[in-house]
Amino acid sequence: MNKKTHFGYQEVDELDKKKFVGDVFTSVAKNYDVMNDAMSFGMHRLWKKILVELASIGEEDFILDIASGTGDISKLISKEYPNTNIFMSDINYEMLDEGRNRAIDESFSRNCHFCQLSGEELPFKDNTFDVITVGFGLRNFTNKERGLKEMKRCLKKNGKLLVLEFSKPINPVFSKIYDWYSFNILPKLGSLLANDSDSYQYLAESIRMHPDQDKLKNMMLTSGLSNCKFFNLLNGIVAIHIGYND
Ligand SMILES: C[S@@+](CC[C@H](N)C(=O)[O-])C[C@H]1O[C@@H](n2cnc3c(N)ncnc32)[C@H](O)[C@@H]1O
């Protein structure tokens, strides 16, 4: 029997999850940026800026942005550190294509390379990158442990991994309001702005199935990363995890 995993609240064969996730992002690609702003009231921009600050990037670093989607994180890095080499990468062609077009249109493609790949099987040699970022991507992986091990393998000595992801709110009252928003408002917003409520129902469910702050930190430690820590944003609705390859 095939191994099982979750796609939102559904239990599915591991072999099928990649296709289901692919369908979600193919469906949302064109409206992804508008929806991101609407859902988070623009706050995702600030969270990504904080991630880039925490990355303390060197002027000529090699950077891998996994699950780069439409390229928000790569854009911030490219504009602030024009001499870095940024590998924008995503498993989904439509999302990567949106990101590449945007990089050209918004003049940040000069130091970007574009690769369609899975974060679970990185086609890079050991010790390649100074910094690896994953913004709101890890949640969608079929095998997060495998992905984290691959990221650790591809980091140079003293390189760092930063994971920006939805996490678990700390305050129980806040958590209730957030649940109400996620399951009542998000799918409606998806339907209204992108004619797609299912993808935003998946978003709400996948967030609940994702490991909380401590669990993800332990997974990063288990993958071989050191000095792992996390920073909660917006009461833990979002967290940034950092781990080092020492
Ligand atoms: C929510 S979007 C995040 C995009 C961008 N990083 C951002 O923060 O706006 C998640 C992205 O993860 C990508 N993705 C899902 N599974 C992946 C995998 N196994 N490897 C690489 N990318 C993956 C999707 O195609 C999608 O573009």
Image (spheres, rainbow, N blue to C red):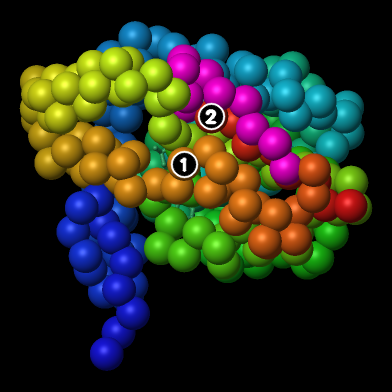
Name above or below for residue 192 compared with residue 221: above
Query: Which residue does the image show at 40% across and 47% down from the upper left?
Result: 210
The residue at which mark 1 appears reads as 212
Q: Let me know if residue 114 appears in the view.
A: no
Q: What is the magenta range?
A: 228-238
The reply to whether the magenta stretch includes residue 231 is: yes
The residue at which mark 2 appears reads as 239
Disc 2 to disc 1, C-alpha distance:
9 Å
Report the amino acid beneath label 1: Asp
Nearer the viewer's eye, disc 2 or disc 1? 1
Return the residue nearer the eye: 33 or 1: 1
Tags 2 and 1 in contact by the CB under 8 Å rule? no
Q: Secondary structure at mark 1?
A: loop
Q: On the picture, is 30 further left or further right than 142?
A: left
Predominant secondary structure in magenta? strand
Report the amino acid beneath label 2: Ala
Q: On the picture, is 13 further left or further right than 130?
A: left
Question: Ligand 1 appears in which quadrant?
Answer: top left
Query: Which residue does the image show at 26% across and 57% down from the upper left?
Result: 7
Return the residue nearer the eye: 185 or 82: 185
Query: Which residue does the image show at 57% across and 67% down from the upper left?
Result: 146
Name above or below for residue 187 compared with residue 16: above
Q: Residues within 10 Å of mark 2 (few under 14, many from 20)?
A: many
Q: Secondary structure at mark 2?
A: strand
Residue 25 position in % (x across, y down)? 30, 45
Q: Tag 1 or tag 2, which sits nearer the N-term?
A: 1
Residue 126 position in % (x across, y down)? 80, 65
